[in-house]
Amino acid sequence: MHGGRVHRARRRRSWPRLTGDELGPTTVWITGDQCTPRNSALRGLDASRTVVLMIESLADARRLPYHKRKLVLIFAAMRGFADDLRSAGWTVDYYEERDNDEAPLAEHVARYGPRRIRTMMQSEYGVDTRLRALADVHGCEFETTEHANFISTAAEFERLFARGQKRVTMETFYRKMRVKTGILMDGAVPAGGAWNFDAENRRPPKPGMHFPPEPRVPLGNHARDAIALVEKHFASHPGEIGNFDIPVTRAGALAYADDFFRSRLADFGPYEDAMLAGEARLYHSRLSAAINVGLLHPLELCERAEGAYRAGAVPLASAEGFVRQLIGWREFVWQSYWRTMPEYRTRNALGADLPLPAFYVDGETDMACQRDAHRTIRELGWAHHIVRLMVLGNFALLAGVEPQTMTDWFWYMFVDGYDWVMVPNVIGMTLHADGGLIGTKPYAASANYIDKMSDYCGGCRYDRKKATGDAACPYNALYWDFIARNERRFASNPRMALVVRNWASRDAAVKTAIRERAATLRETLRAGGRF
Ligand SMILES: Cc1cc2nc3c(=O)[nH]c(=O)nc-3n(C[C@H](O)[C@H](O)[C@H](O)COP(=O)(O)OP(=O)(O)OC[C@H]3O[C@@H](n4cnc5c(N)ncnc54)[C@H](O)[C@@H]3O)c2cc1C
Ligand code: SF4
């Protein structure tokens, strides 16, 4: 959660450095996505002279209409983590269910008189700015330690740009991370002799696929209390809490991960891009929410994946596919975010300006792929990567939905959503609003791709083969209209040139009909209508 959109320059105030007793007790402020046993802000501190501060701020949770499940996860994880810290001998000053964080902070300062507030690096730009300002109000020195839930450093990332490059591909960065961590490496060469098994990992779903049952996640007291809290204060927020099944403790998250490695990882690789109506998860780990809150560390998960491969339990393509997501994509978007914020969040290279389509609010649409995606999100606060990218994101890209609106929507509707991960994934990867910094080409696709990778189209009222007429799949006209609108820009992109030529070679009357259909669809969306 945590709001605060774009903030200007990071203010670094220097205070005279105090030492020893002059400092008074140190306050370590732990925020909702820092529930990691590796929290670096606690490192090297004397528990007898340290107080951990944790605040549940309702105002913070109201900044955007966050999915109810996400709020339950954060409040429950915070309470459980506070228990763990107390058991480990730390003093925890915990403020439950408070209107905001200003008043509890003032109470805390009055009670403990800290001169220094230390926090692990915040994952979100806006929260970092805000905490600095709050420390300032109380005249406290503000100190941050490195983020413990990532394995790359800003310096490593920066070195890749050293020769004046404007952009660095994820693949280049990923290979560096493989070498750095030694994950799936045989000495200096990648296991199996290749860095990338993507070509083996694009299988469509097949009839009669079998999926293991969901592991049972027992509800502890903290999850039960957090559900009651969310029902009480956030009843109007989107999402369902029934059958809450997100692990909120480290033990629960480890058990959920065990189940993934045992029963899903082997098939993760080949079917990672496949989509099926009514089957949200397929072989995905569904661990992102637990990782982003700090309950699991990406490296421990990569080591488990490698261990499963070395033991002969899973194919290399599956282990590599999973590792690539974690030490490749996750680290890459993290570093990209901090290298480019706050300006990056405002980018809109394609000039997209449509409002959020009405069915992104209530899920009411005749498009079978969209309907299934919104139902899944309502129920779980989660959908797998290809549903996010190629159903929800692709539609927004083709229709031209305004990037900041779309980023906020993804941020508040997903249990794993945070500014640091949404901004590069939505502004960059999905909407190409950064002009090609994160991805070399837009992930734009017609119904053809969705039909190939899913079983949605067979049960849809729209015809996946048609681009014009009322029965035609909306993705098709919007796809070609998107190419037409951006023809000049994409003509010089080697990865888009072929499709631009394809469009240019079409019959003029066909082009006109497609563009008219797209204009009608876009006008309907602009007017708050649906189809
Ligand atoms: C539009 C859009 C929005 C997204 N928003 C988020 C978000 O808010 N939070 C989030 O954690 N991921 C986000 N992702 C990335 C990815 O879709 C999710 O991490 C993944 O679907 C979570 O499900 P999983 O745990 O089963 O992942 P798996 O498919 O099992 O992958 C394993 C892990 O790799 C990491 N990962 C994979 N891809 C990415 C990526 N592109 N960026 C960052 N981490 C990645 C996640 O930690 C994930 O748990 C987004 C992707 C898109 C296209
Ligand atoms: S026909 Fe079009 S709208 Fe319907 S499911 Fe297929 S891609 Fe989605």
Image: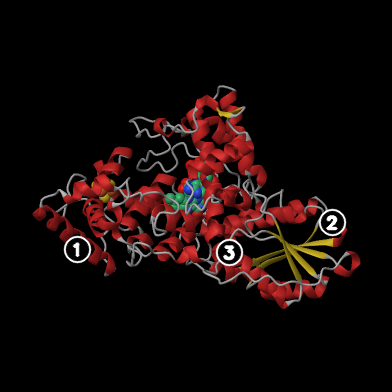
Q: How many marks?
A: 3
- Residue 473 location, x and y as percent? 22, 50
For disc 3, the neighbor class at 10 Å (few under 14, some 14 to 19, many from 20) is: many
Going by the numbered disc 3, the residue's amino acid type is Tyr
Q: In the image, 509: left or right of 81? A: left
Distance in Å between CA atoms under marks 2 and 1: 64 Å
- The local secondary structure at tag 3 comes to helix
Quarter of the figure that contains the C terminus: bottom left
Going by the numbered disc 2, the residue's amino acid type is Ala
Q: List the residue tagged with mark 2.
A: 47
Please report whichever mark, 3 or 2, sits nearer to the chain's N-terminal start: 2
Q: Nearer the viewer, residue 322 or 382?
A: 322
- Residue 206 location, x and y as percent? 34, 31
Q: List the residue tagged with mark 1.
A: 520
Above-or-below relation of 203 to 425 = above
Q: Is the Cβ of the residue at disc 3 closer than 8 Å to that at disc 1?
A: no
Q: In the image, 140: left or right of 494? A: right
Outermost residue toward the left in this view: 509
**Residue plotted at (47% across, 67% down):** 236
- Residue 299 location, x and y as percent? 63, 40
In which image quadrant can residue 407 be found?
bottom left
Going by the numbered disc 1, the residue's amino acid type is Thr
Q: List the residue tagged with mark 3.
A: 125
In which image quadrant can residue 22 be found?
bottom right
Q: Nearer the viewer, mark 3 or mark 1?
A: 3
